[in-house]
Image (cartoon, rainbow, N blue to C red):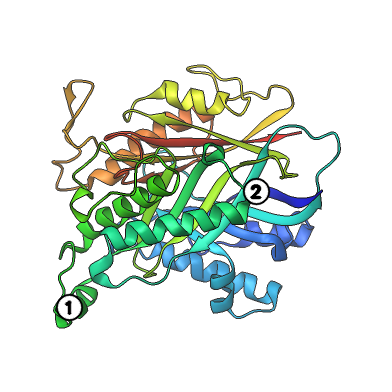
Amino acid sequence: MRTASVGVFKVATTGPGDVSGLMAMIGSGAIDPATILAILGKTEGNGGVNDFTREYAVAALCTALASELGLSPEAVEQRIAFVMSGGTEGVLSPHITVFTRREAERPAGMSGKRLSIGMAHTRDFLPEEIGRSAQIMETARAVSAAMADAGIIDPADVHFVQIKCPLLTSDRVEAANARGSKTATTSAYSSMAYSRGASALGVAVALGEIDSDVHDDDVLRRYDLFSSVASTSSGIELMHNVIIVLGNSASSASDFEIGHAVMNDAIDAPAVVSALNSVGLGVGLGVAPRATEGREFVNIFAKAEASPDGSVRGFRHTMLEDTDISSTRHARAAVGGLIAGLAGTGAVYVSGGAEHQGPAGGGPVAAIARLS
């Protein structure tokens, strides 16, 4: 049976422009650049509207890969899905995770479902569509397309959907006003949450986690509506959504497997343990992942959120009231520290802003293991 094999490589970076680790792996033959499908990264910016480390990192990667692929940097950006999440507060460590995909025969003795990956793009959005039902429904269609690209049929086999989505700027708001249209918000920072939330609801619609009867007014209001596998990040560098679906497929010949759990709040350590255990990694509270049955820890991907009611398990927190540091930075640091302690490394992917991504104040957490 002809199918695909997915590879996963975690590479440390010394800064948003550092591509040396990736190029060394390409030079050694560990990674064939022609097979790179997606790159997810953590950069050390502030994660806000003016976090240009994301764009810098993508530009550096595209320039480096252009010569390897014989393409222009612009063509590389169209070919590969780049998702850079800004903010490495606390013990979080800057790094990239490279996903490759190539055709391969599934070995006759291989059993079970293995890691599969698919990618899709929405059309460009008008500024007034960001954070509204148009973004929700277009995202839902793109998620279905990415599932098909990954060869995943059952929504239950989808364990993480990473989306890069746009945000509003003053110029974009003005462009909408000039057409006689109003945007969901005039605040660039608030628009990040609207875009993340609408994108996550699109995932929930596509996977049947909620029905399609969702409206503009539900975004950032109906927190009972959410996806348990969506992870969305806003950026200034695009006007469409880039969707990466990660799951397991019986047709995959990958050496990797993915599983997930849902954190109910920012200190839900058992959920992180559950995610690690779901891919066969023996772990308990205070114990770093250990290989079991020939399995090796690769990475964790999670969302972090300051509980909108201002408390965690009955005790007040001040993340939403701190005018010096944004709540998303607090959340990344808190959840990043929790996950790093359980994973045994700070090189984990923790993204802030989990609107409609898991229950309010919580978020999805997915783990990838290598089967040797």
Could you say which disc has been placed on residue 174 in the image? Answer: 1
Which residue is identified by label 2?
9
> Which residue is at the front of the view, 21 or 305?
305
- Mark 2 Cα-neighbour bin, 10 Å: few <14, some 14–19, many ≥20: some
Q: Which corner quadrant holds the C terminus?
A: top right
Query: Which amino acid is tagged 1?
Result: Glu
Q: Which mark is residue 350?
A: none
The residue at 76%/32% (across/down) is 111
Residue nearest the viewer, comparing 316 with 5: 5
Residue 228's spot in the image, x, y percent? 41, 37
SS type, badge 1: helix
Q: Considering depth in this image, is 126 or 151 the residue closer to the camera?
A: 151
- Residue at image position (69%, 78%) is 70
Foreground disc of the pair 1, 2: 1
Instruction: Sort mark 1 into few (<14), some (14-19) or many (20+) by Cα contacts within 10 Å.
Output: some
Q: Can residue 39 be spotted in the picture?
A: no
> Where on the picture, by quarter, is residue 237?
bottom left
Q: Is mark 2 on a helix, strand or loop?
A: strand
Counting from the top left corner in percent of width and height, residue 202 is at 37, 52
Q: Quadrant of residue 45?
A: bottom left
Q: Where 356 sits versus 318, above or below?
A: below
Is 125 situated left or right of 97 in this image? Answer: left
- Which residue is at 62% across, 52% downward? 150
Between discs 1 and 2, the one toward the N terminus:
2
Image x and y of residue 19, in percent: 59, 62
